[in-house]
Amino acid sequence: MAQFLSEENFERFRTLIYDASGIHFSESNRSILESRLRDILRKNNFEASDYFALLKKSSEELKLLLDSVTTNLTRFFRNTSHFQTFEYFVVPDLLKRKQETGGTSMRIWSAGCSTGEEPYSFAMVLKELLPSSHKPEIIASDISLKSLVAGKEAFYPEARMNGVPDKYLGRYFERKPGGYLVKDEIRNMVRFDYHNLKFDSGFRNLDVVICRNVIIYFDEAAQQAVIDKFWDAMSPHSYLFIGHSESLFGMKTRFEFVKTEWASVYRKNIDG
């Protein structure tokens, strides 16, 4: 099959995207980039060179392109073993330490939150586990503006509800025509915000960072940079969740690999 982009244009677009976001398009996933660009160019009646010039001038247009080339696969309670590790290992450990120090907050960052199912899932677990005196805060970020809008709306068609335990479905969702709306007590625990992982988030003292199936789209240098930024954002004793197919093996990192009964997680531990 003939390629949509010339070699020169493919190199220009993928370099622009990489420099802006860390997302790496190789020859093996070139077809994804070409498909997204083909749709944009035809819809707007652009030539590739004209569109590239526009992207160089307009940060808003570049945001829209990054939105279009990201993959937003998610669902409620995706990877049950991660939620079991969170519920039975991570939260009890963090609670014990906070009780020892008098802390009452728990800060979590869902990085690459897509349309919100992930942060809302973790919010429901926290709602069940944390004492009323504790004040959980979940920051949910993504590079996709469309996904963030959907997450804030918190309405999900019935087909998207697979995986939600019955106890959560009845307690934290309101049945609406065509689907379910997350109730305010869970919605208010989550703050959605645009963020590009290429840059420092400015977050600090996070207890948990969840970034699953995101860094798989980055090359080694960009992965290392993201993981370093997570380390800086996390509290002295905190946990990092990445995707089952992702690993920090081979990276220069001080994160500890922790294998639990349910799944593996990484821990930052610099206070003993």
Image: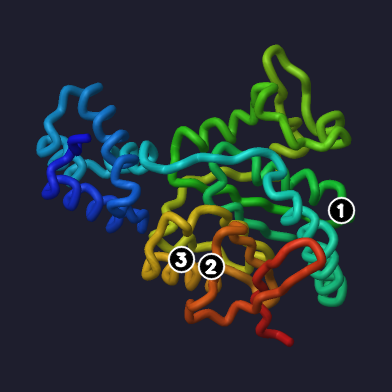
Q: Are the residues tagged 1 and 2 within 8 Å (C-beta)? A: no
Which sits in the foreground, 211 or 148?
211
**Position of the N terminus by quadrant:** top left
- Measure how far apart labels 1 and 2 are at the Cα level: 25 Å
User: What's under tag 1, amino acid-wise?
Assistant: Leu
269 up-or-down from 239: above or below: below
| Dot 3 crowding, Cα within 10 Å, few <14, some 14–19, many 20+ | some
Residue placed at 68% from the left, 14% from the top?
178
Q: Secondary structure at mark 2?
A: helix
Residue 46 % position (x, y): 15, 28
User: What's under tag 3, amino acid-wise?
Assistant: Val
Residue 3 % position (x, y): 19, 38
Residue 165 % position (x, y): 82, 37
Q: Are the residues tagged 3 and 2 within 8 Å (C-beta)? A: yes
Residue placed at 86% from the left, 71% from the top?
96
Write down the residue under mark 2: 230
22 up-or-down from 112: above or below: below
Write down the residue under mark 3: 226
Write down the residue under mark 1: 129
